[in-house]
Amino acid sequence: MEEGETGLLLQSNKELLSSGYSTHENSEEIKKIKSALTWVFLDQSNLWRAGLSWSLFFILTIGVPLVSHFMFACLTCDTMHQRPFDALVQVSLSLFATLSFVSLSSFARKYGIRKFLFLDKLYEDSEKVQQGYTEQLHRSMKILSSFVLPSFIAESIYKIWWFSSGGTQIPYLYNAALSNIFVCILLISSWLYRISISFLVCVLFRLICSLQILRLEEFAQVFEKESDVSSMMIEHLRIRRNLRVISHRFRIFILSTLILVTISQFLALLLTTEPSSTVNIFTAGELALSSITLVTGLFMCLRSAAKITHKAQAVTSLAAKWHACATISTLDDMTEETPMARTVTPQVVYPINSSWDTDEEGDGDDVLDNTNMVPIHASTISYQKRQALVTYFEHNKAGITVYGFMLDRTWLHTIFAIQLSLTLWILNKTIGIS
């Protein structure tokens, strides 16, 4: 397996060198991703590493949380050291980590790192897309650290305080100090392992979506120069195929994460709003941390999916604007050729970059979604071809889908409305808010 992976790396390196792409930068980012996978013990390149990976997964994701809940529930402790929400915290985090681990293992086994991250065909893209994707690769590791480290530090502070201040209330074996230190390190390691795996899948999904956004922005440039309609369709079909592949790979993960987060948050709301519940930073601190982890991971996935869907659908608007500008320009040229029309109809000039009566920029204005006119290159493309291309875009919308449902902003608004209704219903049943 290692020889096949090495052969694939050598072949990809040759292709990247032939296209002028910086192989050194790409290899460095791949090494960082591989080191991240090795760090969370997800490297399953051979039988020994796969066995170690699965063994650590069962120990840190299932074994340690079970022991923690049943042996350190601390039901007889004082109110500051009791853990009334520990079961929900451990189950929700372990399920999220299990879902992420199984997904990553399946991706690595089926595709490998390079194919999964679409690096095997990156040499076909322009140098601008390649450099932009390299920057996103580098940024992804920083994003992963920025999400994992705060949660890890907060959990470490809480666990150290809990074991150091609990005294003899906390169960121990033989020596209280050594037992507490060992268990504390084990619990912190389990927490770090689970949140690292959970965020890693979300960050990789965001990374893959960023590549398709770069390709869409590059594709939008064809409307500003003379291009052939058939080449436009071929490139758009390639992007649509990549989006369909991404949707197929991540649809189970996104749907399962949405269901898991919804159930866990409603259970947390139900438990914390009970009249007999004691809610403070000591008893509900871990619950807040786990909730933030779950919601942040889901938000990252849904935001990336909605963003790329919005960009993909903006191509239709851009094509319609390009078609309208070209048609108007063609009609103006025909009007200028008619002597009588020249005396009746004044010549109209359509600027490429119109400056409107405001100094404020629109939210999200870019090469795909803006209010600028499109340069006219209609002499080589007939009206029928332009109309056919616009019709094709209108009836073949691209984007991230989950079992046929397009993950766009409308879909996100629907999810928010449903969850808000359920939240208000639970609050009405528990504390009387309607």
Image (cartoon, grey):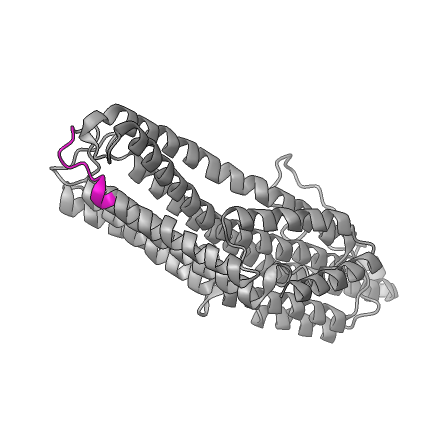
Instruction: Place residue 275 in its image quadrant.
Output: top left
Instruction: Place residue 357 in its image quadrant.
Output: top right
Where does the image place residue 96, in percent across and percent down from the top left?
Answer: 38, 53
- Depth order, front residue of 343/68: 68
- Depth order, front residue of 348/143: 143
Furthest residue in direction front, as rendered: 174
- Depth order, front residue of 137/387: 137
Q: Name above or below for residue 86 compared with residue 256.
A: above
Residue drawn at point x = 86 percent, y = 66 percent: 338
Bounds of the magenta span?
A: 69-78
> In the picture provided, is 102 more to the left or to the right than 12?
left
User: Does the magenta-highlighted stretch encompass residue 73?
Assistant: yes
Question: Can residue 357 be spotted in the picture?
Answer: yes
Q: Name above or below for residue 156 compared with residue 335.
A: above
> In the picture provided, is 280 more to the left or to the right than 351?
left
Question: Can residue 121 be spotted in the picture?
Answer: no
> In the picture provided, is 168 more to the left or to the right than 385?
left
Where does the image place residue 332, in percent across and percent down from the top left?
Answer: 79, 62
Magenta: main secondary structure equals loop
> In the picture provided, is 357 more to the left or to the right than 38?
right
Looking at the rendered image, the quarter that the C terminus falls into is top left
Residue drawn at point x = 74 percent, y = 61 percent: 12
Residue drawn at point x = 51 percent, y = 56 percent: 305
- Depth order, front residue of 44/351: 44
User: Does the magenta-highlighted stretch encompass residue 221?
Assistant: no
Where does the image place residue 40, in percent across and percent down from the top left?
Answer: 49, 48
Where does the image place residue 108, in percent across and percent down from the top left?
Answer: 55, 62
Looking at the rendered image, the quarter that the N terminus falls into is bottom right
